[in-house]
Amino acid sequence: MSYTSDHAERTRLKILDAARRLFNLNGYNGVGIDAIMAEAGLTRGGFYAHFDSKEALFTEVLGRMPELQSPGMRRRMEGDDSDGPGFARAFVETYLSERHRSNIECGCSLPALAGELPRVGPGARSAFGKMVESISSAVARDLRRVHPAMTKDEAAERALASIALCVGAQLLARGIKDETDANRLLAACREMALGNLRE
């Protein structure tokens, strides 16, 4: 039976989605290819038609951030804020939300997996670096649009600091058992990050 390229792409996306969920919940070393394919409703034999290795899959998972996939966020990331707040503000508010904190399985993989990066190959670290660079460039561009007098270097520094605050805050909030305390931490960091963008 032959399959269309659309079928192949949909299958690839199913594997990526399943892998992201399982990596987020169990870590890179806590899940194997068999479990990922079972989660995707597929057999192990089809894995290598889409990915060369588990690390190649992990690398691609790190390069995808669900929070940026909505059409509105993609437009803002590209500089169009006609339908809402600019990218920097929208990113901080979405990332440091209580909803994102409680949605570990389907949320951003960075808080869940950043600690594993030193133990995997250079491809995964390169994908991680490219994603951080892509987000920080969009935040810096938005900062300079809102604050025309801000230098390129200052905007870049503020963007990187804001991203670090977002990822670190989510990592800590997800580790705090008391929901009220976790949400208080998120609120404090959200206000600080937004203040960093407003100044």
Image (cartoon, rainbow, N blue to C red):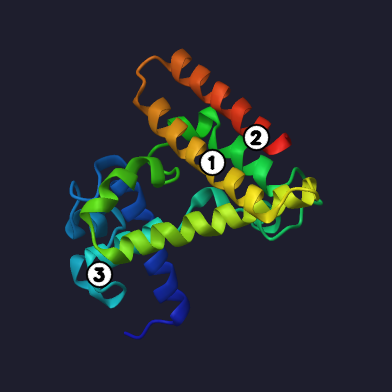
Q: CA distance from mark 1 to mark 3?
A: 38 Å
- Tell me if mark 1 has few (under 14), some (14-19) or many (20+) residues whose alpha carbon lies within 10 angstroms of its own: some
Q: Amino acid at mark 3?
A: Phe
- Eye-nearest disc, 1 or 3: 1
Determine whether label 2 and label 3 are within 8 Å by CB. Answer: no
Q: CA distance from mark 1 to mark 2?
A: 9 Å
- Residue at horizontal 42 percent and vertical 58 percent from the top: 129
Q: Which mark is residue 70?
A: none
- Residue at horizontal 52 percent and vertical 31 percent from the top: 99
Residue 178 position within the rendered picture, expressed as x and y whole percent measured from the top left: 39, 14
Q: Earlier in the sequence, mark 1 or mark 3?
A: 3
User: What residue is pinned by disc 2?
Assistant: 196
Determine whether label 1 and label 2 are within 8 Å by CB. Answer: yes
Residue 168 position within the rendered picture, expressed as x and y whole percent measured from the top left: 43, 35
Total numbered labels placed on residues in the image: 3
User: What residue is pinned by disc 3?
Assistant: 47
Q: Earlier in the sequence, mark 1 or mark 2?
A: 1
- Residue at horizontal 25 percent and vertical 56 percent from the top: 36
Please tell me which residue lies in front, 42 or 86. 86
Q: Amino acid at mark 2?
A: Asn
User: What residue is pinned by disc 1?
Assistant: 161
Q: Where is 27 relative to 74, above or below?
A: above
Horizontal arrangement in the rendering, residue 142 relative to residue 56 (left or right): right
Q: Where is 165 relative to 115, above or below?
A: above
Q: Amino acid at mark 1?
A: Ala
